[in-house]
Amino acid sequence: MNDPILKIQNLTVDFGGVRAVNNISFSLQPGEFIGLIGPNGAGKTTVFNLITNSIRATSGNIVFKGKSILGKSPDKICRLGISRTFQNIRLFPQMTAYENVELGLHNTPRYSLAEAFIRTPRAQRIEADTRRKAHELLEMVNLEAHADKRASSLPYGLQRRLEMARAMAARPDLLLLDEPAAGMNEDECEELIQLIRRIHDEMKYTMIMIEHHMKVVMDLCTGSRIYVLNLGSFLATGSPEEIQANPDVIKAYLGERKNGH
Amino acid sequence: MGYINTILILGGINVIAALGVSILTGYTGLFTIGHAGFMALGGYLSAVLIKEYEVHFVLALIIGGLFAGVASLIIGYPSFRSRLRGDYFAIATLGFSEAIRLLLNNMKQVGPLNIGGSFGYSIPSGMATVPVVVVALLLAMLFAHMFVTSQHGKNCIAIAQDEVAAEMMGVNLLRTKLIALFISAFYAGVAGGLMGLFFAYQSPSFYSITQSSNLLAAVVFGGIQSLIGPFITAFVLVAAPQLLLVMEEWRLIAYGFLFVLIMVFRPQGLLGYVEMNFNFVKAGWNKLVARKSISRKAVH
């Protein structure tokens, strides 16, 4: 067995008096794809925010590629190889689709400021290289035709795909997808499943996906496992079949039948 | 002729400083009402270098600009470190700039140097001619364009649009903002130096809050994420009152009124998000060529 790429140990966070995430631990092998599900307010997005340190953990530890990333700034964590999408899309609205993706590629500018001012041949080569890579990523998510449109002008489903391309542009080892299928219809979900599967197969990312859409989760996590989060703690872990059959999970999602009825 | 020259030179100087503010406010989303302070720092240092140490004025201007840039880090580092933004950063710059002005106003002596306090500091004149200012302006425009279209500049734009997303995408906020501030203060410093060269003296009264708000106004009117917009408005804001001979007080009232109109009807500024390019020249040329070929066909 390899060393895990991500290891979360006894992670806890309090918001005032509310314990949003309570003592959770799990680890991920390189290349794994796991699902994270749970009712609204269970703390799923909070887990992502903790991993990327947009929220500071109260206690516990997060180890990525063998090193603790706890307390490192979000941009540093991204450059170490963890990239994410957002539940409520956060693209750069006035930039084109292409520029959004490009940003992920040059979050650390690849030539110096002096080279920027006089555009040395090296800087121009790097620009061309960045352009090619950005277009490749756009092609991968089937957005090539929309490359020059403003991100805010794209329809919702395409914005979600664009966010994925942008997250991939940061060359992550671990990709966190926060509800990629939110607001999509059946056909779009089917397309999305194909796309995510292809990304996982081709790019060899380790991935964690938060999703409410059961068909998407069950399809993509086949042969892998799903974590169920409820009220900040893990309720169950297992294969899609096990989760679907688990009475506790059904109870958490649907509530309990009153006795005697 | 002298009158036109004055307008060209003062307009050009104002445009250089406004391009600096555009990089910081228009492209990086950080409001500043204190760029007069950076102008003063650059201006006084280059004046001293020229008069006391007989440094060539081009070199003196660059050193003055660099000095303003370094000084900007004094206020930039703690502000950005503590994530001061929006109005708070603007107020910090205002305080810094006023502090500089009051220091210059009240200090007659800096070490062995007599800088004149509120009476100003006179320097040899005749160096800020129209060609000098035009060359400086063209270089300023070229470098600003190079910067905002570079990977460094695009990171600035990302911060302006969504700071959280930019940080999550791996953009180092502190570093990127400091770079934008440094360049922007450099522009202001050079503009301040040119101002002294033109008037043949430096005075703290040049660098009041009116000057700072003038520059901010140029960027807000001209448009965010645009160089050509602030270029035009910065020039017009200097030239128009001179040409129309409107009194100083009325100008400020007009500014206030224009500010409100712009914010209501065009919050992104007149040329907001319009990048400087020569596409319209190209388009015109193509049209011209097309017409020629048509008329040639008609002849045949």
Image (cartoon, coloured by chain):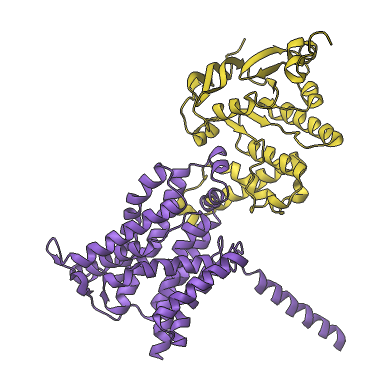
Chain colours: A yellow, B purple
Q: How many labels does the image show?
A: 0
Q: Does residue B8 show up? A: yes
> Residue at 79% of width from left, 26% of height from top?
A216
Answer with the quarter of the image where residue B140 lies.
bottom left
In the rendered image, the vertical position of residue B194 relative to residue A157, given as above or below? below
- Rendered location of residue A192, percent (x, y): 79, 33
Q: Is residue B107 left or right of residue A186?
A: left
**Quadrant position of the N terminus of chain B in the picture:** bottom left
- Name the residue at the front extreme: A260
> Residue at 33% of width from left, 53% of height from top?
B70
Q: Does residue B127 show up? A: no
Answer with the quarter of the image where residue B266 lies.
bottom right
In the rendered image, the vertical position of residue B291 relative to residue B220, given as above or below? below
Pick whichever, B250 or B138, lies toward us.
B250
Q: In this view, does B240 lie to the left or right of B270?
A: left
- Rendered location of residue B32, percent (x, y): 43, 58
- Name the residue at the bottom extreme: B1
- Rendered location of residue B200, percent (x, y): 27, 78
**Quadrant position of the C terminus of chain B in the picture:** bottom right
- Rendered location of residue A44, percent (x, y): 64, 25
